[in-house]
Amino acid sequence: MCSLLAPPWSLHIRDEAPLTVVSMVRGGGWIMMGKRGSQAAPRQLCEGDVAIFRGPDHYTVADDPATEPQIFIHPGNVTKTADGETLCETLSLGVRQWGTDADGATMMVTGTYESAGAASQRLLRALPPLIVLQRGDFDTRILDILVDEAIRDEPAQGAVLDRLLDMVLIAALRAWFARNDAPAWYHAYGDPLVGKALRLLQHNPAHGWTVAGLAEAVGVSRAALARRFTDLVGEPPMSFLTEWRLALAADLLAESDATIESIARQVGYGSAFALSTAFKRHFGVSPRDHRQGATPAELSSAG
């Protein structure tokens, strides 16, 4: 979504999305993390900068830290005034364009990941609530393409924008991890042995992996792989594989209509029963309850 704004402007975001990427294409602004009255020190966002927000924290983006919020963004991208008046149609400026002024001094391109699959939790846990990268900090060529594509109305444009947004996010996170303390598993992908083992496990979860079989595939002894994998990733190969299989199963349950038996075989379990047992031990709910959106707390209170 491309936002076009004329000062004074202030957007208070409470959509609690797991991940949001904001690029300041033109003009500038300020970011205030937290709820009104309990915000951290403002961070400036200049032209060409990219901000990555990790939910569910609320935050405000404004032309000036002193500007009171005028537009409140709720889950589902529902926009309202402070009095609760819905603004979605009022602020429409054309194809994927939104804001207060089509000629506004400020232009931002925003991409929101409205749901985070279980397989993404490892990454989200490694991120702070806010990351700000300046234009010179990372390769922004793909960002320039995203900006050009954002206002086009072509067939399959939504899919194109989704992939471009993914690439912008990857480029920005690579640059951020290169400058900050990245989690152990991130660096492990660069190791010639452990990186290959990780990719084999993630790309072929249904295979009947053993530590010995994995070691043979990467060309080292079982003991050497087990030791190096644990040192770099922080857990043994089979523990990593179990967590990865269950994360994939959780995402497939939420995103598809496939049977539990089918999903079990896709992620490396011999039967629905075997998957269900492992799934409930790990997540605290059965695959069926997870598919219906129940949480362990909700099931406990219902009982």
Image (cartoon, helix red, strand yellow):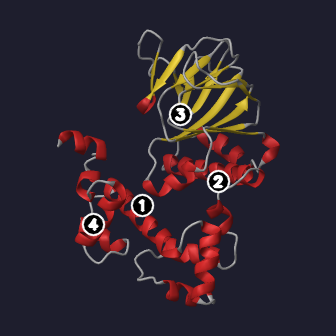
Q: Earlier in the sequence, mark 4 or mark 3?
A: 3
* Residue 64 disc label: none
The residue tagged 3 is: 96
Q: Earlier in the sequence, mark 1 or mark 2?
A: 2
**Residue nearer the viewer, 61 or 278:** 278
Q: Tell me the mark number nearer the camera, choosing from 2 and 3.
A: 2
Residue matched to label 4: 277
Q: Quadrant of the C terminus?
A: top left
Kindly indicate whether the residue at mark 2 contacts the one at mark 4 (C-beta within 8 angstroms).
no
Residue at mark 1 = 247
Residue placed under numbered mark 2 in the picture: 170
Q: Is residue 178 above or below residue 103?
A: below
Q: Which of marks 2 and 4 precedes in the sequence? A: 2
Total number of numbered labels?
A: 4
Whole-number angstrom distance, CA of label 1 to CA of label 3: 33 Å
**Residue 85: where, in percent of width, then height?**
41, 12
Earlier in the chain: of badge 1 and badge 3, it is 3
Circles 1 and 2, Cβ within 8 Å, touching? The answer is no
Q: Is residue 295 visible?
A: no
View extreme (top): residue: 83
Q: Position of residue 118 (x, y in %)?
A: 43, 55
Quadrant of the rendering where the N terminus is positioned: top right
Alpha carbon separation for disc pair 1 and 2: 20 Å
Which mark is first along the chain, 3 or 2? 3
Q: Residues within 10 Å of mark 1 (few under 14, many from 20)?
A: many
What amino acid is labelled 1 in the image?
Ala
Q: Secondary structure at mark 4?
A: helix
Q: Judging from the image, what secondary structure is the residue with disc 3 in?
A: loop
User: Upstream in the sequence, badge 1 or badge 4?
Assistant: 1
Of circles 1 and 2, the one toward us is 1
